[in-house]
Amino acid sequence: MKKILVLGAGRSATTLIQYLDEHAARGGWRVTVADADEVQLADKTLGLGDTEGRPFEFSRAADRAALIEAHDLVISLLPWTMHTPVARDCLRFGRHLLTASYVSPEMKVLAARARRKGLFFMGELGLDPGLDHMSALRLIREIRETGGEIHHFHSYAGGLVAEDCDTNPWHYKFSWNPRNVVLAGQGMAQYRHEGHPVFQPYHETFRRAFPVRIAGRDRFEVYANRDSLKYESLYGLKGIPSLMRGTVRVRGFSRAWQALITLGLTEALSPLAIPDGLSWAAFIAGLLPERLSRGSLDDRLARYLGLDATDPVMDQLRWLGLLSDQPLGSPGRTAADYLQELLEERWRLAPGDRDLVVMEHRLRYRLGGEDMECRSSLFHEGRDARRTAMADLVGLPLAVTAQLFLAGHLPLPKYPAPFEAVIYDPVMEVLETEGVRFEELRFSLGDSTSELEG
Amino acid sequence: MKKILVLGAGRSATTLIQYLDEHAARGGWRVTVADADEVQLADKTLGLGDTEGRPFEFSRAADRAALIEAHDLVISLLPWTMHTPVARDCLRFGRHLLTASYVSPEMKVLAARARRKGLFFMGELGLDPGLDHMSALRLIREIRETGGEIHHFHSYAGGLVAEDCDTNPWHYKFSWNPRNVVLAGQGMAQYRHEGHPVFQPYHETFRRAFPVRIAGRDRFEVYANRDSLKYESLYGLKGIPSLMRGTVRVRGFSRAWQALITLGLTEALSPLAIPDGLSWAAFIAGLLPERLSRGSLDDRLARYLGLDATDPVMDQLRWLGLLSDQPLGSPGRTAADYLQELLEERWRLAPGDRDLVVMEHRLRYRLGGEDMECRSSLFHEGRDARRTAMADLVGLPLAVTAQLFLAGHLPLPKYPAPFEAVIYDPVMEVLETEGVRFEELRFSLGDSTSELEG
């Protein structure tokens, strides 16, 4: 009997734990789920036959080490900053390790040592990073195998809310880490367009969002992700003329988010001396230049943002409560902290809400003298606020990789992420049987593409 | 015979070392100057009678400790991140310590321990922080002693270039750390205006610069410094309706700097994948939105920035070389790194150039039923690119404090910065004899102030 340890029982863990429990008897394993939050732990493990919950404090190093030693394979959903100590314990006790986080330089070194000890260490096994790599790499390989020469690679992904549960003017609710949404796009985005490098400073990224149709649905937009160019070598696309990765939102989100950036509300460095009881309206007033000091706050805000009073963005800002009497709360936090607190209230998934994950790869290539495009799209809705699409798509690649590895179907990887066909082919095959399906559309760019444009 | 150790022989050290050497015989001390750069060391110490240079590697802890142990008082001009180990050595061997850097929370703790051991530990003894505190606190006290009730405190300071050495369209050359200039204003600026809190995100700070006349000269502008509100308690101004600190530039600088911010050239987080040989012109092209892709680069840039082709800002940008064929250089650095490299070339003080430091405090107060304003201004030019105003005003407060303390004229401070009259009064008195003089102007705001406005 093998023993699997899942570290972290947060919102991304639901599907992972259920899958591991359902397959425990056939796979010949038992599951321990460890988390500091006992309510969360009970919620995720109660009623499962082959899974037990275990209260766990990450900071107690001896307890952590003993727990890891008592299992064969560890799946960590902890924040990535906690992965290094976990990996060290896994190395020490000869345990396998899977995570959904980006492989840090430190983890890369530890993974190389793990491989020499015959251990399976792998990160980037969630949705993004994870499923994005596996689905893109498979597609790139297929197109090349048929003789296609790829000159354009775009990949879009986003965690959203299902259209019939979309009840607010931002068309957005949180299905994952709110902090990452608030800080999204900070830094300089970079990608390549027809051979030319493109750089986008933060205050331009959301402004330059463009409309796209995904999986045939004409309601999305995309803004550029931070560093698309690192995928050039990761995906074997050296020298490709056009390369971009982007984040998907429902149309209208990015213009309004740009207004929050312009106001400075995503600033995450400077603790603010917020006076006692300062309301959101007074805070916004304090952010507007003095030269705009005439007129109502509503008028001043619209003027500052260069908007008509009737612009939908003004409704979005009002709906958030930026012009309300609601107090900001305790001083000494940053604008991004105050904004995040407000958004967590407003963008909460109601219990019956279903979320939505969309992903689309667009490859253009030359094949037999013809210019072709292939679009491969995933459109995956959750069941409710607990069994979210996000939890499915973060959890299933981890669970399936663990399952296949324990069954002896995966070799040790050269690089600790799912970049090799011997890894991603079998994983993708099982994911498809679990309902994680990409729909493909291939067409010649010589044809009229007007219907598909965007 | 006392022994003074100066750590760091960089550009701020010139005047400090000269003053200490000149006063060595009368003060009864000898001076050691320690620096890793032997050329710099020779330049700063050659020909001085009571001073010797000593090659020094900060990272060699035993060498550093022995050096500190061999002296009575240490003056550190090292980067502030190096102060903690120096302070620990000073505590260990019972040595006094002066620096020109902000007092970090760590240094505050070490200074309290130093005080209990009878040691004099003090930071913020340069220009800003340093001279700004001492001159402002003295003025605040004087006005209060005559019965004035202060309701408005503004304080402006800047390191510039003397008007007759001002040979470029930015009216700026580096007299101190270029990195700080490139990163200036990042974060959220905050101050108070007539009882209302004001918050300024980075992309607004330079846009909202306003013209000022300083020391009677009508050519300056000021932009808000990061956190003015912390001076409320430091300066005993609790509850004051208007409180602002600002940085001085020659008029026209801030609009052009705003253009660099809008372009994203001060972005300091994201390493960029700069293609081999990419020119500044091509880099700028890569920063402009595709929707502006028609017309010459010059036209596109002006259109993006919302400027006429004849706007002086366009000349400033061209003069920097942003539209030139000059290559950016090696990849993997941030936009701020590339910009800094360019600026260090363009804004270098020529050997004969004289720099300029300006500082002005503006206090408004009610006295005997009348509304009054007091302006206290420092206008200090350097001799040449070596003996700069910056080196005078960073070095003299340090040197004079050391001198007065060693002569027994200063008590141990309660707080390790020059906030007490028993410290700043005697220091300011000696600084005046050294030519560091504030000119004062007091006038009633009932009078026509049109001539003084701005």
Image (cartoon, coloured by chain):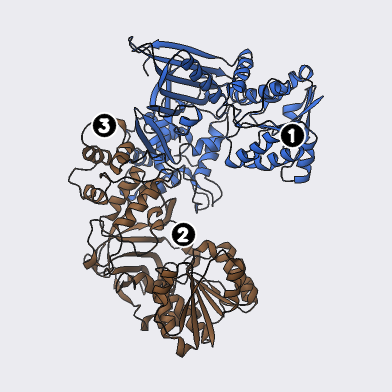
Chain colours: A blue, B brown
Q: In the depicted view, which residue is nearer to us: A170 or A440?
A: A440
- Furthest-left residue in this view: B310
Q: In the displayed structure, does residue A381 sit left or right of residue A297?
A: right
Question: Which quarter of the rendered picture does the C terminus of chain A lie within?
Answer: top left
| Same chain check for tags 1 and 2 | no
Amino acid type, label 1 = Arg
Amino acid type, label 3 = Ser
Task: Say which element carries label 1.
Answer: loop
Say if residue B244 shows up in the picture. yes
Q: Quadrant of residue B362?
A: bottom left
What residue is shown with label 3? B293
- Furthest-right residue in this view: A1
Q: Residues within 10 Å of mark 2 (few under 14, many from 20)?
A: many
Residue B38 drawn above or below residue A141: below
Contact check, label 2 and label 3, Cβ < 8 Å: no
Task: Say which element carries label 2.
Answer: helix
What residue is shown with label 2? B229
Residue A59 drawn above or below residue B433: above
| Same chain check for tags 2 and 3 | yes
CA gap, disc 3 and disc 1? 55 Å
Mark identifier at residue A434: none
First in residue order: circle 2 vs circle 3: 2
CA gap, disc 2 and disc 3? 44 Å
> In this rendering, which labeled residue sits more in front, label 2 or label 3?
3
Q: In the depicted view, which residue is nearer to us: A71 or B36?
A: B36
Subunit that carries the residue with mark 3:
B
What residue is shown with label 1? A95
> In this rendering, which labeled residue sits more in front, label 1 or label 2?
1
